[in-house]
Amino acid sequence: MTTEKIDINIRENLFSTNTETTIYAINKVKEKGNKLYLPILFDLLNSDPEKEVEDEIKKLLATIKDKGSVGSFIQAVEDKKYRAIQKSILVACWQNGLDFSEYLPVFVDKVITEDWEIAFEAFTIIDNLELFPDKEIIDKTSKKIKTTLKTANEQKSYFLHEILTKIS
């Protein structure tokens, strides 16, 4: 994704009532690339679109390689308005292979606070990290995990122990 300006026609077509027009617009975003479209795609996905449109958005999100897109994904993960699509956003995060290591605490919080499905997707992102943040973040995160382990249920406990093993 390289262009840094939103094409008004593409934006309008993304929210077309015609599925083919919307899919055409999604393909244009894929072709041109532009991280500025990510919040629009999250909004579209959050609007409960047709299955075909939903599938195309998910495919696109899973293939993004622009490192500058990481912030948009994290904002969406943390934004309560995207609660309904949080699992899809997290799945895209581990599928696209971008470096989310700096945001380890965000994903650990999801493992701790969310239901099993969301926790599992956040855990998968952490499990697939190739790099880790600096020692200070690791230490703070480890401390939080150890505190949470005292009261965690069996599933959360498993995830948290695995995370501790990975980051230690």
Image (cartoon, rainbow, N blue to C red):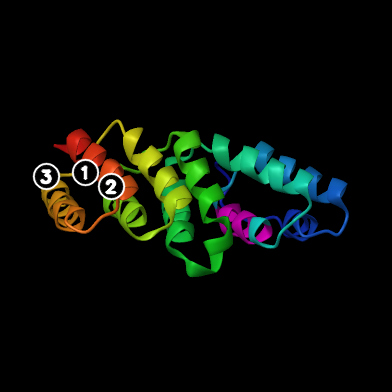
Q: Which residues are magenta?
A: 36-44
Q: Label for residue 79?
A: none
Q: Earlier in the sequence, mark 3 or mark 2?
A: 2
Discs 2, 1 touching: Cβ within 8 Å: yes
Residue visible at 57% across and 56% down? 85
Residue visible at 24% across and 40% down? 163
SS at mark 3 in the image: helix
Q: Quadrant of the N terminus?
A: top right
In the rendered view, tell whether residue 84 sits above or below residue 104. Answer: below
Give the side of residue 95 with respect to residue 60, left or right.
left
> x and y percent of residue 7 in the render?
70, 55
Residue visible at 66% across and 55% down? 45
Q: Quadrant of the C terminus?
A: top left
Amino acid beneath label 1: Pro
Q: Badge 2 is on which residue?
A: 102
Task: Please tell me which residue lies in front, 2 or 25.
Answer: 25
Mark 2 residue crowding within 10 angstroms, few (<14) / some (14–19) / many (20+): some
Amino acid beneath label 2: Glu
Q: Label for residue 133?
A: 1
Q: Badge 3 is on which residue?
A: 135
Give the side of residue 125 with respect to residue 61, left or right.
left
